[in-house]
Image: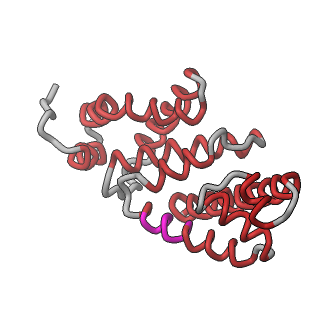
Amino acid sequence: MPNYQYDSLEQLFLLTQQNDKSAFDEIYNRTWESLFHTAYGMLKDDDLAKDLIQEIYIDLWCKRSEKQIAHVHTYLKQAVRFKAIDRFRKAGARFESLEYFIDDIVDGEASDSKLLQKEYAAAIDHWMAKLPKKRREIFRLQFEEGRSTKEISAALDVSVKTIQNQILTSKTSLKLLLEKIIYIFLFFLFGS
């Protein structure tokens, strides 16, 4: 068996495209644990995470000659995320932690994460501009200034219950917006 310890994942993938099974095995050995942690972090199920990763590797091997991959590890991690999201979507489930997911993508290695970060910020700015004036002010006081509902209630001379309702309405609306952004981003990232 050849010694690939000094080869990059990208070099190994080029060899894999030339039907080098040993190079593919080396990619698997170097990336499996990281991919498992990503999948398990989203799915919270050992067996589902392992099955999902297996599907990713099978797809990579079967379509190796068709794929043009600049950064193998980034590609595989994003494939895991996409497949996990697809499972959630098909099951009709919501993300357990949407903020974790967004942060994970934005902090990722891919240059596409910078695009997502810009789109994310622009969409939130646009969303905030469309909020009714009072709701926008409540949202700003809570999330930008970190004020409590009681402090906001006193500052705006509105009941605490009204403040809580406005915040809940805003959070629900924002969560739906962020889910749409993620689906659109992933469609363009993996759909083309």
Circle count:
0
**Residue at the image position 75 percent from the left and 52 percent from the top:** 149
Residue at (14, 30) in percent of width and height:
2
Please tell me which residue lies in front, 55 or 179.
179
Q: Which residues are magenta?
A: 114-120
- Residue at 69%, 72% (x, y): give it: 127
Tell me: 73 left or right of 4.
right
Q: Quadrant of the N terminus?
A: top left
Q: How is the image coloured?
A: secondary structure
Task: Look at the picture and state if 9 lies above or below 161.
Answer: above
Query: Residue 139's x, y, as percent?
Result: 70, 63
Query: What is the magenta segment's predominant secondary structure?
Result: helix
Residue appearing at x 62%, y 69% in the figure: 124
Q: Nearer the viewer, residue 128 or 90?
A: 128
Q: Quick check: 48 left or right of 156?
A: left
Which quadrant of the figure has residue 188?
bottom right
Q: Is 116 covered by the magenta stretch?
A: yes
On whether residue 134 falls in the magenta region, the answer is: no
Residue 112 percent location from the top left of the image: 43, 63
Residue 130 screen position, x and y as percent: 74, 77
The residue nearer to you, when weighing 150 against 50, is: 150
Q: Is residue 93 above or below residue 136?
A: above
User: Which residue lies most toward the top here?
Assistant: 47
